[in-house]
Amino acid sequence: MGGLTPGATAPTLPPGRVAVTPRSLSTGRHPALERLQQHGFELVFPAPARTPTTQELLTELPTCVAYLAGVEPISGEVLRSAPQLRVIARNGVGVNNIDLVAARELGVEVLPAVGANSQGVAELALALAFAGVRRIPWSDARLKAGDWSRSAGVELSGRTMGIIGVGQVGRRLATMAAGIGMNVIGYDAFPDPRWTPPARFRWSTIDQVLAAADVLSLHAPPGDKPLLDSARLARMPKAALLINTARAELVDEDAVLAALNEDHLTAYAVDAFSTEPPNDLRLVGHEKVIATPHVGGFTQESVGRASESAVDAILSVLQCAPAAAGR
C-alpha cells in the first residue's frame, strides 16, 4: 500500500513565486502575505503601491506559480507568458479584467473573493448618497476657500433608493437604506430566493427602478454595452442622484455629462474608472461629480477579509497541483 512510512512527515508545499499586485497589498506589509511566506513561497511585487503595466506583468509572471491579482487588465498574452501559473486569486469579486477564455484554455483557475468587500462598498455607496443630497463636498470646498455659502439639501428618509444589481453589495445597501427610512426598489437578473428583503423593499424591472429612483446605485456586472445610456438616463426623475461604485463600463460617460450639464442629474458619485488613475478628467473635474479613487473595498476590514480569502484560494489550489511543472 502507498502512503507515509512510520515517522514520516506530510509533504510540504513546493516552493515557488507568487505575484502580488493589489495596491492595498503590494507594499508587502499585510499579515495575510506572511502565510504564503511561511509555506516557502517567494513574493514578488511588480509595481509596489500602484497598478502594474502589461509590460511589468510580462516581466514578472513567467516565473510565478500563483498570482494574487488586483484590478489591472490580465490579457491572454500575459497568461500565455506564464507557463507555471496555476491560479489567479482576486482580492475582490470582479474578474472582468481577466481574459477568462484564455485562463480556461491554459488551465489557470480564477478565484474571486466573493463577498469580502461587500460591506465596505455598500457603506461607501450610502455615504456618497448622503454626500450628494447634502452637497457636502461643495460646502466643504467653498468654506475652505473663505466663501460662506449654503445650498439647501434634501433628506433621504422617505425618498426612494433604486438598486440595480441586488447581489452581496446591493442587499446590504438595501437593508441600510431601508433602515434610515428610505423606500427601496431593486432589480437583479438572477435574484437570490434565499434573501429576505426588508419591509420597505420591493422587486421591479429596470425601467421601473429608473423611473422611481431619487437615488440610483449601480451594483451589477458590466455587459457588452453601457447599462445606462442617454435613453435610460432620461427615464430617471429630474434631479436624481446617480452612484456608481461598481464598474465604469456600466455608464455612458458622455450621456452622464450631458445629464449633469442639463440639470437632469443633480450629481454623479463615482468610485470606479475604466483607467485608474483616470486619464479623462471631464467627469472627475465636474462640479456636480463626487469622485473617489476606487476606495469602496479599501477598508481595514474589507482588505483583511479579501486578502485572507485570496491566500486561502492560492494555498488550496497549490496543495493539489505541482507548482513548478510546466503545462
Image: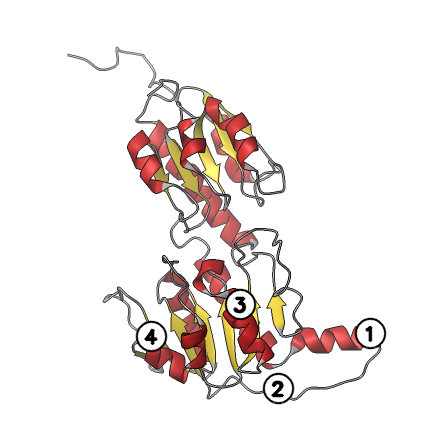
Q: Secondary structure at mark 2?
A: loop
Per the image, the residue denoted by label 3 is 254
Specify few, some or many for label 1: CA neighbours under 10 Å numbering under 14, 14-19, or 20 or more: few
Q: Is residue 247 visible?
A: no
Which residue position holds label 1? Answer: 145
Q: Give the total number of marks visible in the rendering.
A: 4
Pointers 1 and 4 in contact (C-beta within 8 Å): no
Please tell me which of labels 2 and 3 falls first in the chain.
Answer: 2
Q: Which residue is mark 2?
A: 153
Alpha carbon distance from label 1 to label 4: 41 Å
Q: Amino acid at mark 3?
A: Asp
- CA gap, disc 4 and disc 3: 21 Å
Q: Nearer the viewer, residue 147 or 15?
A: 147
Mark 4 Cα shell of 10 Å, populated few (<14), some (14-19), many (≥20) = some
Image coordinates of residue 155 in percent, x first then y, are 55, 86
The residue identified by callout 4 is 206
Measured in 3D between alpha carbons, the distance from the residue under mark 2 to the one under mark 3, in whole angstroms, is: 26 Å
Check if mark 2's residue and mark 1's residue have beta carbons within 8 Å.
Answer: no
